[in-house]
Image: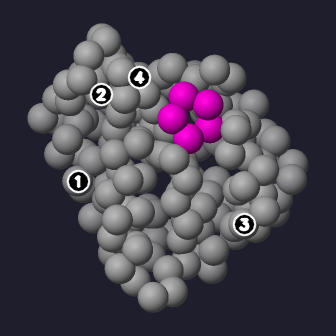
């Protein structure tokens, strides 16, 4: 995949208000990836006086935050989640909105595509989806070193851009 930082910069070049939505389950090993990126970003952004991003932690029902995200009126939304695309564990993918149906997104109560469709109908916003290939989604509190490395890389990259 092309350089994550370069691609994100392109997609966020006109961003003035960014909603970052972390999605996943704490109960299924690498499915926690999106949540950990969001939590890491939240801790770091709390130190800044006027961040242009707001963090939303959606767990397995991100649709429950749709109203809050719409109220925030972001110019761009970044959604981060585990995504099984059959790649090497820890692979980071920028996923086009149109491709959502072809990739397996972990453990959501409603399909992620439905929520994204709703947000796009409600807002004039850009959507950026970042997927992290899990190594395992079995039940338990574990995270693979490959996915942990990707979490750190994504967190660092987003902080540098915003």
Other-residue count near label 1 (Cα within 10 Å), few / some / many at <14 / 14–19 / ≥20: some
Labels 2 and 1: the sequence-earlier one: 2
- Whether the residues at callouts 4 and 2 have beta carbons within 8 Å, the answer is no
The disc placed on residue 84 is 4
Q: Which of pointers 4 and 2 indicates the residue nearer the eye?
A: 2
Task: Look at the numbered disc 2 and give the secondary structure of its residue.
Answer: helix
Q: Residue at x 30, y 11 (%)?
A: 138
Q: CA distance from mark 3 to mark 2?
A: 29 Å
Task: Look at the numbered disc 3 and give the secondary structure of its residue.
Answer: helix
Q: Is residue 60 magenta?
A: yes
Instruction: Return the residue at label 2.
Output: 30
Q: CA distance from mark 3 to mark 4?
A: 30 Å
Span highlighted in magenta in the image: 58-62
How many marks can you see?
4
In the image: residue 156, left or right of residue 104: left
Instruction: Return the residue at label 3.
Output: 72
Q: Residue at x 54, y 28 (%)?
A: 60
Q: In the rendered view, would you say 107 is above or below 113?
A: above
Labels 4 and 1: the sequence-earlier one: 4
Q: In the rendered view, would you say 154 is above or below 106?
A: below
Q: Which of pointers 4 and 1 indicates the residue nearer the eye?
A: 1
Q: Is residue 99 magenta?
A: no
Which image quarter: residue 89? Answer: top left
Instruction: Return the residue at label 1.
Output: 152
Q: Residue furthest top?
A: 138
Which image quarter: residue 72? Answer: bottom right
Task: Look at the numbered disc 1 and give the secondary structure of its residue.
Answer: helix
Q: CA distance from mark 3 to mark 1?
A: 26 Å
Q: Residue at x 51, y 20 (%)?
A: 107
């Amino acid at each position: 995949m092309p350089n994550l930082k370069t691609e994100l910069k392109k997609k966020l070049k006109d961003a003035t208000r960014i909603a970052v939505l972390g999605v996943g389950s704490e109960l299924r090993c690498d499915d926690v990836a999106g949540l950990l990126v969001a939590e890491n970003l939240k801790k770091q952004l709390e130190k800044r006086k006027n961040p242009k991003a707001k963090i939303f932690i959606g767990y397995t029902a991100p649709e429950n935050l749709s109203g809050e995200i719409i109220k925030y009126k972001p110019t761009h939304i970044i959604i981060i989640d585990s995504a099984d695309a059959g790649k090497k564990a820890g692979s980071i993918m920028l996923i086009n909105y149109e491709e959502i149906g072809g990739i397996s997104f972990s453990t959501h109560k409603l399909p992620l595509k439905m929520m994204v469709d709703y947000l796009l109908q409600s807002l004039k916003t850009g959507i950026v989806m970042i997927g992290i290939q899990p190594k395992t989604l079995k039940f338990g509190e574990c995270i693979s070193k490959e996915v942990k490395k990707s979490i750190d890389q994504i967190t660092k990259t987003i902080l540098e851009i915003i």
